[in-house]
Amino acid sequence: MSRRVLSGALLSASLVWAVAAMAADKPLYGAFGLDTAGFDNTVVPGNDFFRYANGTWLDHHAIPADKPAVSLRLEMTDRTEARLHAMMDAAAAKVSHQPSDLEGKVGAFYKAFMDEARIEKLGFTPVAPELAAINAANDRDAIAGLMGQGNVDFYPSLFNVNIDVDLKDPKRYALYIGQGGLGLPDRDYYIEKSFAETKAKYQAYVATLLKLAHWPYADAAAASVVGFETQIAEASWTKVQERDLNAMYQPMAVGDLEKFAPGFAWKTFFAAGDVGTVPTIIVGDKSAMPKLAAVYASTPVDTLKAWAAFQVLDNAAPYLSKPFADAAFEMHDKTLAGQAVQRVRWKRAITAVSGGDFGIDHFGTFGTMGFGVGELYTAKYFGPDAKAKIEALVHNVLAAYHARLEKLDWMGPATKAEAIKKLETYTIKVGYPDRPRDYSKLVVTDDDLVGDVRRAAAGDWAFYVGRFNGPVDRSDWSMTPQTNDAYNGSLRDIVFPAGILQAPMFDANADPAINYGAIGGVIGHELTHGFDDEGRKIDASGALRDWWTKEDAEKFEARAKALGAQYSSFEPLPGVHVNGNLTMGENIADLGGLTLALDAYHASLGGKPAPVIDGLTGDQRVFLGWAQAWRGKVTDSYVKKQVVSDPHSPRQFRVNGVVHNIDAWYAAFGVKPDEKLYVAPDKRVHIW
Ligand SMILES: [Zn+2]
């Protein structure tokens, strides 16, 4: 396929319009940042606020065949993607075979993915070294050695190893280990009857990949692989269990793992992992670990080999020839997410180089040059003026949280003092990291895609291992600048990448109330994560320590429980319920976020009344700004996957589930007791 793939012609109509609007210094949506034409005025806000704010837009926008969703958030991603496309096309056009500069390396990586003729000719031979190593592994020890290379190569592992801040000694890093090994998104897919059909399709998929790679007796091997993964699933902790940070923190001498979880070749595993000398390791999913080791010890070596081969092919499939990439698309994107059609090649190429959220097509952040792409992207598309505006907004929301904590009626003075101390230690990161990631040692060539991915993964792992024994770097980022998302991290930082700082989340030309409702709500959301069901267990120094009085902890939990019960009653599809415990942290953050955004908006008025615009009051516009930010819809398969594997609630509940707990929303829209979203004042949940 030619690389001259016409960036202009593929811009969507809304994107062309967006570019024109930006040039005119006008807001992107509507006259003041709110697309009121997208409202459904036949719906009473108190009956379905999400639908009221978004209904007409939803009726006029179908889910595109190459996505599992349609939304304004995805329009943001599309805009970033179009810019990256132009950038990478230009870089690839002038690239040498093995460039030494950052732009050249990004261009070569992209070019290697776009070289379809070569990729088709190679078939699965790029992963022949991995398959040969698996074939040569004649006992469980040898397979454990391959699993140990899971962070630097396509090999799977029963045990995931990663490096992060030590939660009990936050000035240092620690090595964490926990359960792994599943090819489907969650243990539920293997165990719950409702997923039986998907599980059968998965087994067929395992057989397909093994056959394509000429694995002997592929059908029987596939059955044994899925049987093995089902045993892993049965031993694994649920995602709700994994939210208990104390239960997930069990320090152990590496030498004691053999006694704790016998049957697995731990020494071989760690020796292969290239992590240096590590005396202590933090074990998560504690009761699952010995069970997984026992499953491994009792599984025939041939099954382990077939499993490893399948997982290598599955992990590498997006970079292999069409039969592999298409099969992986059918399984991961069509069956599991409801995306009807595979994205065109250049879009997948961008995901391969950049990582992150550019559609799904079964890519992760493994083996990308994400931070390098972000450096080039923000140099061109994120100016210091945007950075200053956002920083001011963040500080206003921070001040609102401070004021709320001071006057919180259910929290005692001792806990309150600690909470405020913690809030004051937060650092705010906007746009891009101060210090760029060093890619100078990474070798990228324009004709070795799988090698590029492998070397990029190894380079990433070397970065983490290299600083393992040094002090914690609080300037670090764990999301790339082009990502359309934000996070609250283990460094007591809240991070807003350039990718999320665009309309409708943030529009420099919009009415401030809309920005407060949208990005202000997200800023509040990220801040309160430091105090949700997980975050509240971390203290001001970043350490996992209980700083709550017993009484305050009980009051918090009672409120959280009431919120969880509300969400568990939500039913996005008939018979499919939200899991109030899995989504607890995100729901608390949404509720706190919008509450804080409203406070911060009020404070920003400096004592003056809010203007009325287009008949809408200031408070109404803040709530509508939030509702517009979540405008969109997803496929049914995506919803089913989301409720078991994603800690975020489906989008309509991120709006309706939040506003009906906020008193000011009732006043703003005159919501009456007989309307569907109405919750009696004493049943509304107030946390922050
Ligand atoms: Zn969140």
Image (cartoon, grey):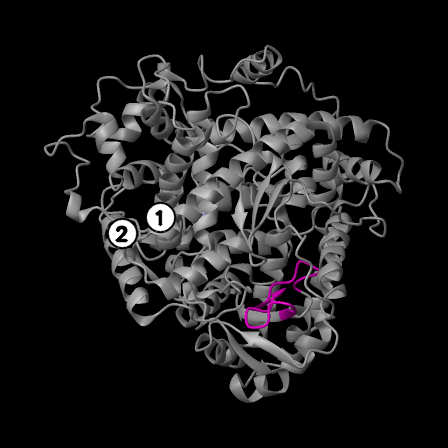
Residue matched to label 2: 563
Q: Mark 1 belongs to which amino acid?
A: Asn
**Residue at the spot 58% in from the left edge and 30% down from the top edge:** 389
Ligand 1 within 8 Å, label 2 CB: no
**Residue at the spot 58% in from the left edge and 87% down from the top edge:** 256
Query: Can I make out residue 649 in this image?
Result: no
Which picture quadrant has residue 288?
bottom left
Viewer-proximal residue, 413 or 472? 413
Please determine whether, in this image, residue 551 is positioned above or below residue 526: below
Please determine whether, in this image, residue 647 is positioned above or below residue 223: above
Residue farthest to the bottom, as pictured: 259
**Residue at the spot 74% in from the left edge and 32% down from the top edge:** 379
Q: Mark 2 belongs to which amino acid?
A: Leu
* Image coords of residue 525 (percent x, y): 43, 45
Q: Is residue 156 magenta?
A: yes
- Give the structural element (helix, strand or loop) at label 2: helix
Residue farthest to the front, as pictured: 607
Sequence-first disc among 2 and 1? 2
Please determine whether, in this image, residue 554 is positioned above or below residue 657: below
Query: What's the magenta region?
Result: 150-174
Viewer-proximal residue, 60 or 139? 60
Residue farthest to the left, as pictured: 674
The answer to whether 620 appears left or right of 140 in the picture is left
* Image coords of residue 160 (percent x, y): 58, 66
**Residue at the spot 55% in from the left edge and 84% down from the top edge:** 263
Label 2 neighbourhood size at 10 Å, few (<14), some (14-19), many (20+)? many
Q: What is the distance, in whole Å, between disc 2 and disc 1 at their CAs? A: 8 Å
Label 1 neighbourhood size at 10 Å, few (<14), some (14-19), many (20+)? many
* Image coords of residue 444 (percent x, y): 82, 45
* Image coords of residue 290 (percent x, y): 48, 81
Asked if the residue at tag 1 contacts the one at tag 2, i.e. Cβ–Cβ closer than 8 Å, the answer is: yes
Residue matched to label 1: 587
